[in-house]
Amino acid sequence: MRNKLRGEIEADAVTYAIGVVSPEEIDQINILRASFLAMHRALDQLTQRPEALLIDGNRFTKYNDVKHHCIIKGDGIFLSIAAASILAKTYRDEYMNNLHAVYPHYKWNSNMGYPTKAHRDAIRLHGPCDHHRKTFTLLPQQLELEF
């Protein structure tokens, strides 16, 4: 359903963009700041400047001089936030499926980046790759292993 909606959103949206932050950047600035950076990068790509931003959540780092409003559980209130959430989720899922094609032993096509038991078992067996965040506890005994 999300993928069907993604096509409709992309066809009907006035403008949209996807912002990406690398695992190395996330390790440097933390996941919260990285999510704001990804949003800023998406905003940088828009073909039209927004009058205001509706942000799903309770925090955001100001983007230039554009007004913003943080709305907790905003994806259940505003269609524009729900549409942005669908785009973010489907692009991330696509990215994870592409990673799975290169690194099938991590099972990214089924865990979508979440630390399932199978994913942690694969890290134990194969070690992490460049797409793993090094500051995230990949394994309980991570501090004892040399990566």
Image (spheres, rainbow, N blue to C red):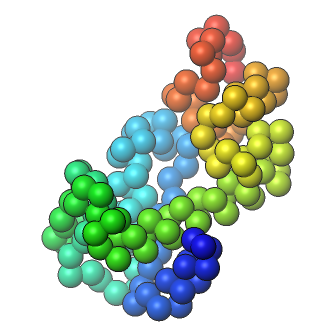
Q: Is residue 25 above or below residue 5?
A: above
Q: Is residue 106 above or below residue 136?
A: below
Pinpoint residue 25: horizontal percent, then vertical percent: 49, 44
Q: Is residue 20 above or below residue 31?
A: below
Horizontally, residue 76 falls left or right of residue 145, namely: left
Query: Can residue 5 be seen in the rendering of this structure?
Result: yes
For this orientation, the residue located farthest to the top is: 144
Q: Is residue 88 above or below residue 115?
A: below
The residue drawn where x is 64% and y is 49% is: 112
Horizontally, residue 48 falls left or right of residue 117, namely: left
The residue drawn where x is 51% and y is 28% is: 135
The residue drawn where x is 44% and y is 36% is: 28
Pinpoint residue 94: horizontal percent, then vertical percent: 67, 63
Pinpoint residue 69: horizontal percent, then vertical percent: 18, 65
Q: Which corner quadrant of the image does residue 44 belong to?
A: bottom left
**Image mark count:** 0
Pinpoint residue 115: horizontal percent, then vertical percent: 62, 34
